[in-house]
Amino acid sequence: MDASQFEGLAEETLARLQAAVEDAARDSVDAEVVGGILTLELESGGVYQINRHLPNRQIWLSSPVSGAWHFAWSGGAWLDTRSGERLEALLGRELSQILGEAIELG
């Protein structure tokens, strides 16, 4: 995947995640994309940051629960480079635990 394909896919992913979190979590999470970084501020005080990392063609996630994660495109999903877990599954599971309600992100 070349740089422009990655940029387009990453931007689409961040926008989709923002919309899904806003839809699922409503008033419990403030979601905003600025400069290629999706910031999720939780009402309870934690902050997630999800950003594109062009040199590695990855999406990086910083979690207040589990730390740093790196996701590479597998042709159909963003998968963690160590465990193979999907980005949406990890984020949805952690937000569900924090908010005490089921959060499905796709």
Image (cartoon, grey):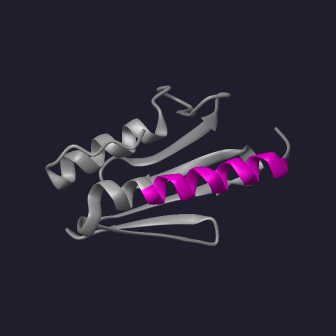
In magenta segment, residue 7: yes
Say whether residue 98 is left or right of residue 67.
left
Q: Position of residue 29 (x, y in %)?
A: 30, 66
How many discs mark residues in the rendered view? 0
> Of all residues shown, which one is farthest toward the front?
23
Quick one: quadrant of the N terminus?
Answer: top right
> Is residue 64 something that shows in the picture?
no
**Left or right of 16 in this view: 36:** right
Is 25 placed left or right of 39 in the picture? left
Q: Residue furthest left?
A: 100
In this rendered view, identify the residue nearer to me: 91 or 80: 91
User: What residue is shown at x 57% (from left), y 39% (from top)?
Assistant: 71
Q: Which residue appears at 55% of the width and 58% of the height? A: 15
Residue range corresponding to the magenta coloring: 3-19
In this rendering, would 83 be left or right of 7? left
Q: Is residue 43 above or below residue 58?
A: below
Name the main secondary structure of what is drawn in magenta: helix
Name the foreground residue: 30 vs 58.
30
Viewer can see residue 29: yes
Q: At 18% across and 55% down in the image, what residue appears?
A: 99
Quadrant where the image shows the C terminus? top left
Residue 27, horizontal then vertical, whole percent? 25, 69
Q: Position of residue 44 (x, y in %)?
A: 19, 68
Residue 103 appears at what percent x and percent y? 28, 46
Quarter of the image where one finds residue 102: top left
Above/below status of 93 relative to 38: above
- Snapshot quadrant of residue 34: bottom right
Magenta span contains residue 78: no
